[in-house]
């Protein structure tokens, strides 16, 4: 039975278990630890792109009554073609108690995953279980319990997550070490039963949230950078773009791995960001960057390491930007309306 289980599915369950023990750090829900997202911040769909701007997977979401996302449709790209990978539905929803089902079809079989989550009065999960049914046979996959300690009613002190995967117990404790003046966590430390330690440093600005992760080196005991995420927020405090980086120890730089675009309009389907990008012409000539887009919007240029090297507001139509102060290399140009282009200086 175990050999039939989808490895990607198991990985997604573990990621989900880890994610729900931490607060969604959006501007609308960043102090209580709640993993429910307010109605005004709920996205209709999202698309994941690799570091070459190729789409890899996408999802269309439905939401529980209190604001937990369930992927109604999930797609993957194979040889440039988008294919339906799984479907999801809400089985029951009482507000704090959620049950949803995900059906994944493979060449060999169909896997149905049933996930149940119970939450406390703060909207934090206290228990999560998942079971998988393959060829008519059901087996438990994952059971997670969460225990919370609080600094105050709206600030977490720590969370203990006990997980059992295929009968194997593991645990992780997350400690919220520091908060900023707005009550948002700025240092988050996680210890696991396997002896690993992770430290996250979170910084906020009006339109960005940056999370840098460090892990202890088992040989030296020193902290070393591992991952970084940069989220861009719109005027309503919603995530519109979230980039994931890994640290390259050869070049000692953060390298872009993938990014997610969140869509809030047209709640019934996946917005076609590529169609918008086709209306935008970006080119470089003799150290000058030309941008022609139909909308008035903010233009930001980033290095591949994620550093912002230029930003300005442009009117509709074409503008010219000098790149004379930039070193040769590859850069990403992002428009406020959602498009992204890669250029070479």
Image: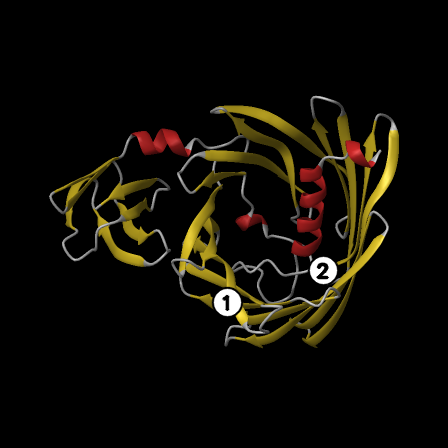
Residue 296's image quarter? top left
Q: Where is residue 288 drawn, in percent x and y?
A: 14, 46
* Residue count near mark 2 (Cα–Cα under 10 Å), binned few <14, some 14–19, many ≥20: many
Report the side of 261 relative to 172 (left or right).
Answer: left
Q: Nearer the viewer, residue 34 or 40?
A: 34
Q: Nearer the viewer, residue 268 or 191?
A: 191
CA separation in Å, label 1 and label 2: 21 Å
Q: Residue furthest front?
A: 219
Q: How many marks?
A: 2
For the N terminus, the quadrant is: top right
Residue at x 76%, y 25% (from the top left corner): 110
Front position among marks 1 and 2: 1
Which is more N-terminal, label 2 or label 1? 2
Q: Nearer the viewer, residue 166 or 186?
A: 166
Scheme of colours in the image: secondary structure
Report the side of 343 relative to 22 (left or right).
Answer: left
Residue 276's place in the image compared with 177, above or below, is above
Element marked by disc 2? loop
| Label pair 1/2, CB-CB below 8 angstroms | no
* Residue count near mark 1 (Cα–Cα under 10 Å), binned few <14, some 14–19, many ≥20: many
Q: Which residue is mark 2?
A: 124
Q: Where is residue 286 drawn, in percent x and y?
A: 11, 43
Residue at x 49%, y 24% (from the top left corner): 79
Q: Can residue 266 be spotted in the picture?
A: no
Q: Can residue 88 be spotted in the picture?
A: yes
Q: Where is residue 237 drawn, in percent x and y?
A: 47, 56
Q: Where is residue 194 drawn, in percent x and y?
A: 73, 64
Q: Which residue is mark 1?
A: 202
């Amino acid at each position: 039975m175990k050999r039939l289980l989808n490895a990607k599915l198991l990985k997604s369950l573990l990621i989900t278990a880890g994610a729900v023990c931490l607060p969604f750090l959006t501007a609308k829900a960043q102090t209580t630890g709640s993993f429910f997202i307010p109605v005004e911040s709920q996205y209709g769909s999202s698309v994941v792109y690799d570091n070459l701007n190729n789409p890899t997977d996408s999802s269309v979401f439905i939401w529980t009554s209190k604001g937990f996302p369930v992927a109604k449709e999930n797609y993957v790209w194979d040889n440039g073609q988008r294919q339906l990978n799984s479907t999801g539905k809400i089985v029951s929803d009482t507000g704090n108690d959620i049950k949803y089902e995900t059906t994944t079809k493979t060449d060999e079989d169909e896997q149905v995953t049933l996930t149940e989550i119970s939450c406390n009065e703060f909207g934090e999960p206290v228990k999560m279980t998942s079971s998988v049914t393959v060829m008519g046979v059901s087996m438990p996959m994952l059971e997670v319990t969460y225990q919370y300690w609080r600094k105050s009613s709206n600030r977490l002190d720590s969370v203990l997550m006990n997980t059992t995967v295929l009968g194997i117990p593991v645990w992780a404790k997350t400690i919220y070490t520091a908060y900023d003046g707005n009550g948002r966590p700025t240092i988050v430390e996680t210890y696991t039963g396997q002896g690993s330690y992770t430290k996250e440093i979170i910084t906020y600005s009006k339109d960005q949230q940056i999370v840098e992760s460090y892990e202890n080196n088992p040989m030296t005991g020193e902290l070393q950078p591992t991952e970084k995420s940069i989220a861009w927020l719109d005027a309503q405090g919603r995530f519109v773009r979230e980039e994931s980086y890994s640290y390259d120890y050869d070049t000692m730089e953060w390298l872009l791995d993938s990014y997610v675009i969140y869509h809030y309009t047209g709640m019934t389907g996946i917005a076609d960001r590529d169609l918008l990008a086709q209306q935008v012409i970006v080119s470089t000539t003799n150290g000058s960057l030309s941008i022609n887009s139909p909308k008035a919007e903010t233009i930001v240029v980033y290095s591949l390491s994620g550093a912002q090297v230029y930003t300005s507001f442009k009117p509709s139509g074409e503008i010219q930007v000098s790149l004379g102060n930039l070193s040769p290399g590859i850069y990403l140009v992002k428009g406020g309306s959602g498009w992204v282009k890669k250029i070479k200086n």
